Amino acid sequence: MEIVLLLLLLAAVAVWYRFWYASSRRKTQQLKSSGLVRVDEVHKRYRHLPLGNLGILHKIKDGQRVQVIFPSLTADEDVDYIYSWHDLRVVRPVLERPKDGDEAWLRATGIAALIEERLQLEPEITKLKKYHHKLGELLDLVDESEEHLEQQDTLAVTHTQVGYLLEQAKLLEQQYVDLIKVTLREALIRSELEDFNPDLRPEERRDLNSRYQEIRAEYQVWKRVAHTFPELPSVL
């Protein structure tokens, strides 16, 4: 009798584990597909988040721990990214646009796109800096060598072009930061003022969206130019 009960218990545990594993896997897939997530009771850990409990999925560890990015503003109104770990059970995917026209959701999706592109730009800038520095070192070596003196002009031109491209990338990154800052500030104001109508006025939303489209177009042009240098590694 005891053996039978033990076998039944083991069978029940096996069924529960399969259900739990399948459920966890399905939820992690939904989170990855969504990108934008809600974290239950995050306000208990962080206060004054412009987007409330909405965050951007960053990574999932061991299928049970989820790292979420919460964009925020410092006391000096600089953009800050809070990288926060949470249990899978308290993180929910935002798979569809809310039917009630959730303005926080609209702002979050826009900010998520801005942050994603800005984070993609950062490693490109780092690689450009290294490439520009390497070209400078090669120029110094060529200056000291008569044998490779004929390569000096080519290296000098490339060094100048990459330097210009690097400056453009820095300016583009700052434009992303400025637009993220403006959007976060507007979101924070609306979340802090209880009696304020939380709906973003249509003309304001159009202005922000128009500015985003301009910056995104500049980013696409920058990428095409950056990829004309065959030695430049690319993460895109």
Image (cartoon, helix red, strand yellow):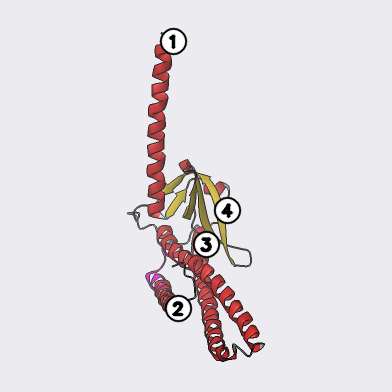
Q: Quadrant of residue 145?
A: bottom right
User: Could you tell me which quadrant the C terminus lies in?
Assistant: bottom left
**Callout 1: 10 Å neighbours few (<14), some, many (20+)?**
few
For label 4, the SS is loop
The extreme right residue here reads 144
**Callout 2: 10 Å neighbours few (<14), some, many (20+)?**
some
Dot 2 or dot 4: first in sequence order is: 4
- Which disc is residue 188 wearing? 3
Q: Residue at x 49, y 58 (%)?
A: 51
Percent x, y of residue 157: 53, 88
Q: Distance between the residues labelled 2 and 4?
A: 37 Å
Residue 202 shown in magenta:
yes
Dot 4 or dot 1: first in sequence order is: 1
Q: Mark 4 points at which residue?
A: 47
Q: Is residue 11 above or below residue 221?
A: above
- In this rendering, the label closer to the viewer, 4 or 1: 1
For label 1, the SS is helix
For label 2, the SS is helix
Circles 4 and 1 in contact, beta carbons < 8 Å:
no
Seen in the image, is 14 located left or right of residue 82? left
Q: Mark 2 points at which residue?
A: 222
- Front residue of 136/21: it is 136
Residue 219 shown in magenta:
no
Type of amino acid under label 2: Trp
Q: How far apart are marks 4 and 3 (CA)?
A: 11 Å
Residue extent of the magenta highlight: 199-206
- Which disc is residue 2 wearing? 1
